[in-house]
Image (spheres, grey):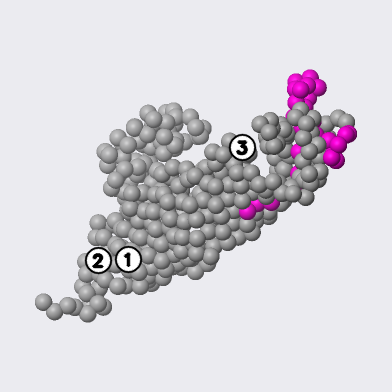
Amino acid sequence: MPRLPIFLAIALAPPALAADDLSFSVNQNASSVVTTLSVLADSEGSLIGAYDATDNPTGTQTRPGFFGGSGNNPIPLDLDVLSSTDVNTNPTGAFAVSIDTDALTFDISALALNLIASGAAESGIDLNLEWSTFNTINPTFIFPGGIPLSLPLSSTQLTTLSLDQTAPSALPGVLTPDAPNSYTLAAAVPVSVTVAADSATLPIPETAFDAVLPLTGQLTLNTDNTATMTLAFDLEGLSQSIDLSAAPALEDLPFELPTLGEDTASVLLTLQFASAAVAASGSINIVADGATASCNAADLAEPLGALDFSDVLTFLTFFAEGDPAADLALPTGAFDFSDVVAFLTAFAAGCP
């Protein structure tokens, strides 16, 4: 059978959504994140021995210079945190898309992706410390200045790596027809990238920066008001410098400085981070399933866009479990009869 020209095939195809809003959820098993994330953060501060005349009279004391001195004195300190993390996980998330197949445009909103939803990623993090010369009591040791000390952090994990849309795209995304009810898409989405790590050795502040992510992909619209979208985010060359000078200082962080023997010098760190440089490479590949957005607060179950007994059952389940989706009325956080009334009112209003 001869093939129809593409424009004719599209014209004769069963009608899909001409213009509508769809809610998408990420298919975790079909989606992937393969990236390397590097962070370099620098700070200034001080360290002081953990000695306390009442609570820790045998604790470490710190004193400026090679020898002598008295009391327990703060020592100026520079500290750099260097991190490199290989991420290979399956993300979760959701977003909404407004599609206009007549104008061949679309807009993404409320994009929120948890890129390490399948578990924290192990991170290699090193500390580089530099200070003025000082000596310690309990243990007795000299820490010469001008010689950076590099220490790996133990048990360090990347606990947060997320993308959250911060604003509408400056321009609508573009749809290019390439098959009946199927389109190639392209857009650029402004996001905030949030990174956080957890270490048994040293608290690491959460870092966030803004970026514009170019994305490409494929959109398939179905006649039952569902859709499938694939998105690819190219992270190659993504880098950002972040000003952290307004972030609160980290104070009195317990830390063990190694000596040449088995003993360590117990000190307290006070740090003020100045800036961080973040760089990434790799890609994010998202497969998401979409359906017509819920018509109102009572539209909690498939099929979205229609109110039926499945919405009632879902509400009752959410209400019993204390799920926020059932918290439909004030006061927020309390699941009571006002939430039931709000659901029944929305349900009675029906879908347009």
- Which residue is at the front of the view, 54 or 68? 68
Q: Which mark is residue 18?
A: 1
Alpha carbons under labels 2 and 1: distance apart: 8 Å
Is residue 191 depicted above or below 339 in this figure? below
Q: Which mark is residue 201?
A: 3
Query: Which type of secondary structure does the marked residue at label 1 adopt?
Result: loop
What's the amino acid at mark 1?
A: Ala
The image position of residue 340, as x and y in percent, is: 39, 32
Mark 3 or mark 2: name the one nearer the start of the chain.
2
Task: Please give the range of residues in magenta.
Answer: 40-69
Q: Is residue 249 magenta?
A: no
Please state the horizontal and vertical placement of residue 22, each as a whole percent of the image: 36, 56
Residue 54 included in the magenta stretch of the image: yes
Residue at disc 3, secondary structure: loop
Q: Is residue 60 left or right of residue 24?
A: right
Q: Residue furthest left?
A: 1
> What residue sits 11% from the left and 77% below the top?
1
Disc 2 marks a residue whose amino acid type is Pro
